[in-house]
Amino acid sequence: MAENVKAVEFIPCRKICVVDPGELNVTSGETVVFVNSSKAELRVFFGKGELFGTELIRISGGGRQELQVKARRVERPVVYHYSVFCDETDTFAVGGSNPRIILNP
């Protein structure tokens, strides 16, 4: 995988869906690949959509989606929390705590 591409995987585990990694560090312009390892659709909610230019993505079971970080460059780190609903487990995914992406300068 190229240096400016980061991956986040959603993994079903018993009755929950796990986000790996739970915390991801990115910079403006990088690409993040979201990988759905479950058999069912995932919905990923990004709040206001500032980070990727969208508030919601849907990823079919076994699918993946690439998004480019569209947020402008920052002078200090900014934390973006997001949530993921997994149809296979009928739960929101967890990643140690609620998943988050940190935009770094």
Image: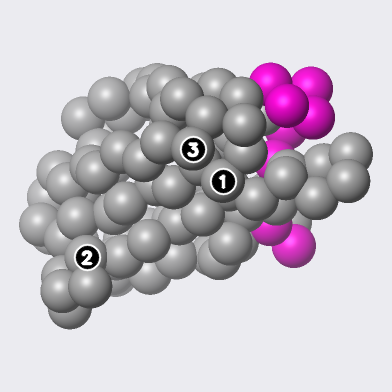
Whole-number angstrom distance, CA of label 3 to CA of label 2? 19 Å
Residue 99, percent from left and from top? 60, 51
The tag earlier along the polypeptide, 3 or 2, is: 2
Task: Choose the circle earlier in sequence order: 3 or 1.
Answer: 1
Front tag of 3 and 2? 3
Could you say which is closer to the camera, residue 79 or residue 56? 56
Q: Is residue 27 magenta?
A: no
Foreground: disc 1 or disc 2: 1
In the rendered structure, find residue 5 and report the number of the disc placed on it: 2
Q: Which residues are magenta?
A: 87-96
Looking at the image, which residue is at 88% across and 46% down? 14
Q: Which residue is mark 3?
A: 62
- Judged left or right of residue 96, residue 14 is right
Left or right: residue 64 versus residue 31 is right
Q: Earlier in the sequence, mark 1 or mark 2?
A: 2
Q: Is residue 6 visible?
A: yes
- The residue that mark 1 highlights is 37
Q: Amino acid at mark 3?
A: Gly
CA separation in Å, label 3 and label 1: 5 Å
Residue 85 position within the rendered picture, expressed as x and y whole percent measured from the top left: 64, 27
Q: Main secondary structure of the magenta part?
A: loop
Which residue appears at 46% of the width and 25% of the height?
Answer: 60
